[in-house]
Amino acid sequence: MPEAASAAATRATIGDSEFDRDTAVFRRAPGVYDIDLSAGWTIINAVNGGYLLAVLGRALGDALPHTDPFTVSAHYLTASQPGPAVVRTEAVRTGRTLSTGQASLFQYDDEGNEVERIRVLASYGDLDALPDDVRTSAKPPAVPPMDQCFGPEDGPAPVDGSSAIADRLMLKLDPATLGWALGQPSGRGEMRAWFGLADGRDADPLSLLLAVDALPPTAFELGLKGWVPTVELTVHVRCRPAPGPLRVSITTRNLAGGFLEEDAEVWDSADRLVAQSRQLARVRLG
């Protein structure tokens, strides 16, 4: 079998991929779900915030009468670690076109006490029922062709365990936003990339929750180093993405008092704006 055909034959599908298995939650009781947070979605030792959002998003999609996230707002209270966790959900209001719920993820400290890691308030609906009318001034980001962009595999070998999530992503960064990797940050606070899952699984509304928080932080292009922990992240899912790679653009306009915002747009292969987000994150100065 030709190499290209073999690769196509082994592409993961929505519902049968590593992402689906690692975000799967198991209902223990009505509104209560167990999960073992995978170490495969970590940066250093912390679990990626977009992966966590997808976990809670999957639990809410099971708990609510509607299955598609429309808007998800999360507050990250403490850093999550790989291992067992519990998600507790509550329906706040259910309507004909929208349902609103809240969810929290808990882990246990060394004394066995529950520690809340993240709390979410979200509204769900049916993306396929939305009208086709689009009136927008937004334009897809000008990302060079994928073969002119660069991924983690093009740089120095990372320290073992430093960024396990990179092995699970297809990430090709725009060279114009890679000055930080060469010791020459642009100072513009921009990051752009082609994005997908490494096993070829196409995007869906849940993986969009990952996509908005999967690129290197814009703080790197501002000349800052180190961890940039998310304080709050709000995602708007606008429509179900078409098959194919996504383009993600993230910008920061204001860093003040040790905090910055990141505004993200996610575009699909049909040139549609499929998700938007804003997050507030802490940075280490000096």
Image: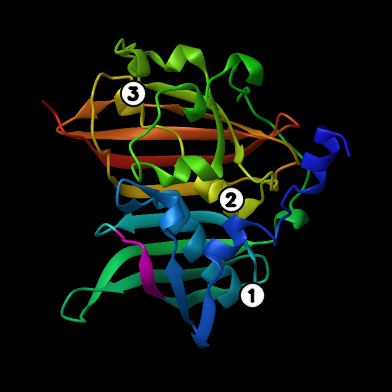
Please, is residue 119 above or below residue 152 in the view? below
**Residue at 53%, 71% in the rendered image:** 59
The picture places residue 278, in percent across and down from the top left corner, at 41, 40
Q: Count residues near mark 1 (Cα–Cα under 10 Å), then give few for <14, some for 14-19, many for 20+.
A: some
Span colored in magenta:
80-86
| Real-space CA distance between mark 1 and mark 3, rounded to the nearest whole angstrom | 38 Å
Amino acid under disc 2: Ser
Q: Count residues near mark 3 (Cα–Cα under 10 Å), then give few for <14, some for 14-19, many for 20+.
A: few
Query: Does residue 46 appear left or right of residue 33 in this picture?
Result: left
Please, is residue 166 above or below residue 73 in the view? above
The residue tagged 2 is 207
Question: Closer to the camera, 228 or 82?
Answer: 82
Amino acid under disc 1: Pro
Report the colour scheme. rainbow
The residue tagged 1 is 65
**Residue at 20%, 73% in the rendered image:** 109
Instruction: Decide which of tag 2 and tag 1 comes sooner along the chain.
Output: 1
Query: Does residue 220 appear left or right of residue 135 in this picture?
Result: left
Please, is residue 281 above or below residue 145 in the view? below
The picture places residue 33, in percent across and down from the top left corner, at 47, 79
Badge nearest the viewer, 2 or 1: 2
